[in-house]
Amino acid sequence: MQLTDLEHRALLDWIDLSTQLRRVTNAAKQAELVERLRALAGEHKANAARIADLESERAARVERAAGLERDVAARGQAIIELEAKLNAGVGLTSRDLLALQRDIDTARATRSSKEDEQLELLGEIEELDAELARLREAGTELAAEGRRLQTERAARSAELDAEAAQLHSQRAAREGELPESLRARVAAREAAGEVGAAIVVQRSCGACGAELSGMAQSRLTSGGQGETVECEECEAVLVRP
Protein backbone atom coordinates (compact mmCIF):
# COMPACT_ATOMS: atom_id res chain seq x y z
CA MET A 1 0.00 0.00 0.00
CA GLN A 2 1.27 3.42 -0.96
CA LEU A 3 0.61 6.20 1.57
CA THR A 4 0.50 9.91 1.00
CA ASP A 5 2.96 12.10 2.88
CA LEU A 6 0.28 12.99 5.46
CA GLU A 7 -0.77 9.35 5.86
CA HIS A 8 2.89 8.31 6.18
CA ARG A 9 3.45 10.89 8.92
CA ALA A 10 0.25 9.81 10.65
CA LEU A 11 1.35 6.14 10.58
CA LEU A 12 4.78 7.00 12.00
CA ASP A 13 3.11 8.94 14.82
CA TRP A 14 0.67 6.07 15.36
CA ILE A 15 3.59 3.62 15.63
CA ASP A 16 5.38 5.85 18.14
CA LEU A 17 2.24 6.33 20.24
CA SER A 18 1.54 2.57 20.16
CA THR A 19 5.08 1.89 21.37
CA GLN A 20 4.56 4.31 24.23
CA LEU A 21 1.24 2.68 25.06
CA ARG A 22 2.83 -0.76 25.24
CA ARG A 23 5.47 0.66 27.56
CA VAL A 24 2.82 2.23 29.79
CA THR A 25 0.70 -0.94 29.75
CA ASN A 26 3.69 -3.01 30.80
CA ALA A 27 4.64 -0.48 33.48
CA ALA A 28 1.05 -0.56 34.78
CA LYS A 29 1.58 -4.18 35.80
CA GLN A 30 4.09 -2.84 38.36
CA ALA A 31 5.63 -6.30 38.47
CA GLU A 32 8.50 -5.33 40.76
CA LEU A 33 6.23 -3.55 43.23
CA VAL A 34 3.72 -6.41 43.18
CA GLU A 35 6.55 -8.85 43.90
CA ARG A 36 7.70 -6.70 46.80
CA LEU A 37 4.15 -6.65 48.18
CA ARG A 38 3.88 -10.42 47.76
CA ALA A 39 7.17 -10.94 49.60
CA LEU A 40 6.09 -8.50 52.31
CA ALA A 41 2.81 -10.35 52.75
CA GLY A 42 4.76 -13.60 53.11
CA GLU A 43 7.00 -12.05 55.77
CA HIS A 44 3.99 -10.67 57.62
CA LYS A 45 2.25 -14.06 57.54
CA ALA A 46 5.37 -15.86 58.77
CA ASN A 47 5.82 -13.25 61.51
CA ALA A 48 2.20 -13.66 62.63
CA ALA A 49 2.57 -17.44 62.68
CA ARG A 50 5.72 -17.15 64.79
CA ILE A 51 3.90 -14.82 67.21
CA ALA A 52 1.05 -17.33 67.51
CA ASP A 53 3.53 -20.15 68.23
CA LEU A 54 5.33 -18.14 70.89
CA GLU A 55 2.07 -17.03 72.49
CA SER A 56 1.07 -20.68 72.73
CA GLU A 57 4.44 -21.54 74.29
CA ARG A 58 4.11 -18.65 76.72
CA ALA A 59 0.59 -19.67 77.75
CA ALA A 60 1.81 -23.19 78.47
CA ARG A 61 4.69 -21.90 80.61
CA VAL A 62 2.45 -19.44 82.46
CA GLU A 63 0.05 -22.28 83.24
CA ARG A 64 2.91 -24.48 84.39
CA ALA A 65 4.36 -21.64 86.52
CA ALA A 66 0.96 -21.06 88.14
CA GLY A 67 0.70 -24.75 88.93
CA LEU A 68 4.17 -24.69 90.49
CA GLU A 69 3.21 -21.65 92.55
CA ARG A 70 0.21 -23.49 93.94
CA ASP A 71 2.40 -26.56 94.57
CA VAL A 72 5.05 -24.51 96.38
CA ALA A 73 2.40 -22.80 98.51
CA ALA A 74 0.80 -26.12 99.40
CA ARG A 75 4.16 -27.67 100.32
CA GLY A 76 4.99 -24.60 102.38
CA GLN A 77 1.77 -25.00 104.33
CA ALA A 78 2.44 -28.71 104.77
CA ILE A 79 5.92 -27.94 106.13
CA ILE A 80 4.44 -25.45 108.61
CA GLU A 81 2.00 -28.06 109.83
CA LEU A 82 4.71 -30.74 110.07
CA GLU A 83 7.04 -28.41 111.96
CA ALA A 84 4.25 -27.47 114.34
CA LYS A 85 3.57 -31.14 114.99
CA LEU A 86 7.28 -31.78 115.46
CA ASN A 87 7.67 -28.90 117.88
CA ALA A 88 4.65 -29.95 119.88
CA GLY A 89 5.88 -33.54 120.12
CA VAL A 90 2.62 -34.65 121.68
CA GLY A 91 2.26 -38.43 121.71
CA LEU A 92 5.28 -38.93 119.47
CA THR A 93 8.04 -41.43 120.03
CA SER A 94 11.65 -40.84 119.10
CA ARG A 95 11.10 -42.89 115.95
CA ASP A 96 8.05 -40.78 115.14
CA LEU A 97 10.05 -37.60 115.60
CA LEU A 98 12.83 -38.84 113.30
CA ALA A 99 10.32 -39.87 110.65
CA LEU A 100 8.60 -36.50 110.92
CA GLN A 101 11.91 -34.69 110.51
CA ARG A 102 12.67 -36.76 107.40
CA ASP A 103 9.25 -35.81 105.99
CA ILE A 104 9.99 -32.15 106.67
CA ASP A 105 13.41 -32.39 104.99
CA THR A 106 11.92 -34.15 101.98
CA ALA A 107 9.15 -31.54 101.71
CA ARG A 108 11.69 -28.71 101.92
CA ALA A 109 13.90 -30.29 99.26
CA THR A 110 10.93 -30.84 96.97
CA ARG A 111 9.70 -27.29 97.55
CA SER A 112 13.16 -25.93 96.78
CA SER A 113 13.27 -27.95 93.56
CA LYS A 114 9.84 -26.66 92.58
CA GLU A 115 10.91 -23.08 93.34
CA ASP A 116 13.97 -23.49 91.14
CA GLU A 117 11.78 -24.82 88.34
CA GLN A 118 9.39 -21.95 88.86
CA LEU A 119 12.20 -19.39 88.63
CA GLU A 120 13.49 -21.04 85.46
CA LEU A 121 10.01 -20.86 83.93
CA LEU A 122 9.64 -17.21 84.88
CA GLY A 123 12.97 -16.51 83.16
CA GLU A 124 11.77 -18.30 80.03
CA ILE A 125 8.53 -16.29 80.12
CA GLU A 126 10.53 -13.05 80.29
CA GLU A 127 12.58 -14.14 77.27
CA LEU A 128 9.39 -15.02 75.39
CA ASP A 129 7.89 -11.63 76.28
CA ALA A 130 10.96 -9.88 74.89
CA GLU A 131 10.85 -11.92 71.68
CA LEU A 132 7.11 -11.36 71.32
CA ALA A 133 7.59 -7.61 71.75
CA ARG A 134 10.26 -7.65 69.04
CA LEU A 135 8.07 -9.67 66.67
CA ARG A 136 5.03 -7.46 67.26
CA GLU A 137 7.11 -4.38 66.53
CA ALA A 138 8.39 -6.05 63.37
CA GLY A 139 4.80 -6.91 62.42
CA THR A 140 3.77 -3.29 62.87
CA GLU A 141 6.65 -2.15 60.68
CA LEU A 142 5.78 -4.74 58.01
CA ALA A 143 2.14 -3.62 58.01
CA ALA A 144 3.18 0.02 57.73
CA GLU A 145 5.50 -0.78 54.83
CA GLY A 146 2.70 -2.73 53.15
CA ARG A 147 0.35 0.24 53.44
CA ARG A 148 3.04 2.55 52.07
CA LEU A 149 3.65 0.32 49.08
CA GLN A 150 -0.09 -0.03 48.42
CA THR A 151 -0.41 3.75 48.47
CA GLU A 152 2.56 4.04 46.13
CA ARG A 153 1.03 1.43 43.84
CA ALA A 154 -2.33 3.20 43.73
CA ALA A 155 -0.70 6.55 42.98
CA ARG A 156 1.44 5.04 40.25
CA SER A 157 -1.59 3.27 38.76
CA ALA A 158 -3.52 6.54 38.62
CA GLU A 159 -0.55 8.26 37.00
CA LEU A 160 -0.13 5.51 34.39
CA ASP A 161 -3.88 5.33 33.71
CA ALA A 162 -3.91 9.06 32.99
CA GLU A 163 -0.90 8.73 30.72
CA ALA A 164 -2.46 5.78 28.88
CA ALA A 165 -5.73 7.67 28.40
CA GLN A 166 -3.85 10.60 26.88
CA LEU A 167 -1.88 8.32 24.57
CA HIS A 168 -5.06 6.50 23.49
CA SER A 169 -6.65 9.84 22.65
CA GLN A 170 -3.61 10.99 20.67
CA ARG A 171 -3.35 7.68 18.84
CA ALA A 172 -7.04 7.68 17.97
CA ALA A 173 -6.62 11.11 16.41
CA ARG A 174 -3.71 9.95 14.27
CA GLU A 175 -5.49 6.69 13.49
CA GLY A 176 -8.32 8.66 11.96
CA GLU A 177 -5.89 10.03 9.36
CA LEU A 178 -4.97 6.55 8.07
CA PRO A 179 -6.65 4.85 5.10
CA GLU A 180 -9.67 2.90 6.30
CA SER A 181 -8.31 -0.55 5.40
CA LEU A 182 -4.98 0.13 7.09
CA ARG A 183 -6.68 1.67 10.12
CA ALA A 184 -8.90 -1.39 10.58
CA ARG A 185 -5.97 -3.77 10.22
CA VAL A 186 -3.56 -2.17 12.67
CA ALA A 187 -6.33 -1.50 15.20
CA ALA A 188 -7.44 -5.14 15.09
CA ARG A 189 -3.90 -6.38 15.61
CA GLU A 190 -3.31 -4.05 18.55
CA ALA A 191 -6.63 -5.10 20.09
CA ALA A 192 -5.45 -8.71 19.83
CA GLY A 193 -2.26 -7.86 21.71
CA GLU A 194 -0.07 -7.89 18.60
CA VAL A 195 2.02 -5.11 17.07
CA GLY A 196 -0.08 -3.49 14.37
CA ALA A 197 2.65 -1.58 12.57
CA ALA A 198 6.34 -0.87 12.97
CA ILE A 199 9.18 0.87 11.22
CA VAL A 200 11.92 -0.89 9.33
CA VAL A 201 15.18 -0.97 11.28
CA GLN A 202 18.29 -1.84 9.28
CA ARG A 203 16.35 -3.96 6.78
CA SER A 204 14.59 -5.81 9.61
CA CYS A 205 11.11 -5.75 11.11
CA GLY A 206 10.89 -3.32 13.98
CA ALA A 207 8.28 -5.53 15.64
CA CYS A 208 9.82 -9.01 15.63
CA GLY A 209 13.35 -8.40 14.32
CA ALA A 210 13.03 -10.70 11.31
CA GLU A 211 15.08 -9.67 8.29
CA LEU A 212 12.99 -8.53 5.36
CA SER A 213 13.02 -10.56 2.17
CA GLY A 214 14.69 -9.16 -0.91
CA MET A 215 11.29 -8.60 -2.50
CA ALA A 216 10.01 -6.61 0.48
CA GLN A 217 13.17 -4.51 0.57
CA SER A 218 12.87 -3.88 -3.16
CA ARG A 219 9.25 -2.76 -2.78
CA LEU A 220 10.15 -0.33 -0.02
CA THR A 221 13.04 1.07 -2.02
CA SER A 222 11.19 1.45 -5.29
CA GLY A 223 7.86 2.48 -3.82
CA GLY A 224 9.06 5.63 -2.11
CA GLN A 225 8.77 6.90 1.46
CA GLY A 226 5.09 6.02 1.83
CA GLU A 227 5.31 2.40 0.69
CA THR A 228 4.24 -0.26 3.19
CA VAL A 229 4.90 -4.00 3.27
CA GLU A 230 3.89 -6.85 5.52
CA CYS A 231 6.40 -8.68 7.70
CA GLU A 232 6.49 -12.27 6.51
CA GLU A 233 7.11 -13.49 10.07
CA CYS A 234 4.75 -11.52 12.35
CA GLU A 235 2.50 -9.91 9.70
CA ALA A 236 2.94 -6.41 11.12
CA VAL A 237 2.62 -3.53 8.64
CA LEU A 238 6.08 -2.08 8.00
CA VAL A 239 7.04 1.33 6.78
CA ARG A 240 10.30 3.24 6.42
CA PRO A 241 10.94 6.00 8.99
Image (cartoon, rainbow, N blue to C red):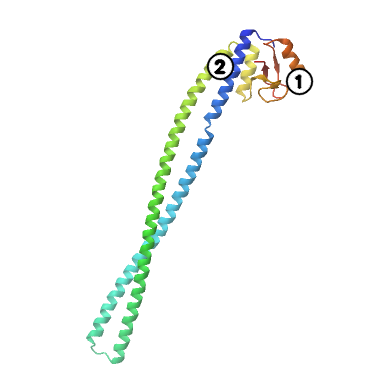
Residue lying farthest right? Answer: 214
Disc 2/disc 1 C-alpha distance (Å): 30 Å
Q: Can residue 50 be seen in this view?
A: yes
Crowd band around label 2 with a 10 angstrom C-alpha radius: few (<14), some (14–19), many (20+): many
- Residue at 46 percent of width and 27 percent of height: 158
- How many residues crowd around disc 1 within 10 Å: few (fewer than 14), some, or many (20 or more)? few
Viewer can see residue 178: no
Residue at numbered disc 1: 213
- Residue type at mark 2: give it: Arg
Q: Residue 171 carries which label?
A: 2
Q: SS at mark 1? A: loop
Residue shown at the point (42%, 59%) measured from the top left: 57
Q: Quadrant of residue 87?
A: bottom left
Q: In this view, does 237 lie above or below 26?
A: above
**Tag shown at residue 145:** none
Left or right of residue 108, residue 190 in this image: right
Amino acid type indicated by mark 1: Ser
* Residue 196 relative to residue 115: left or right: right
Residue at 41 percent of width and 57 percent of height: 56
Quadrant that contains the C terminus: top right
Which quadrant would residue 182 be assigned to in this image? Answer: top right
User: Where does residue 163 sit, x and y in percent of width and height?
Assistant: 50, 22
Question: Mark 2, mark 1: which one is toward the viewer?
Answer: 1
Q: Relative to residue 196, is residue 84 depicted above or below? A: below
Residue 195, how many percent across, how many down?
63, 23
**Residue at 26%, 85% in the rendered image:** 86
233 vs 136: above or below: above
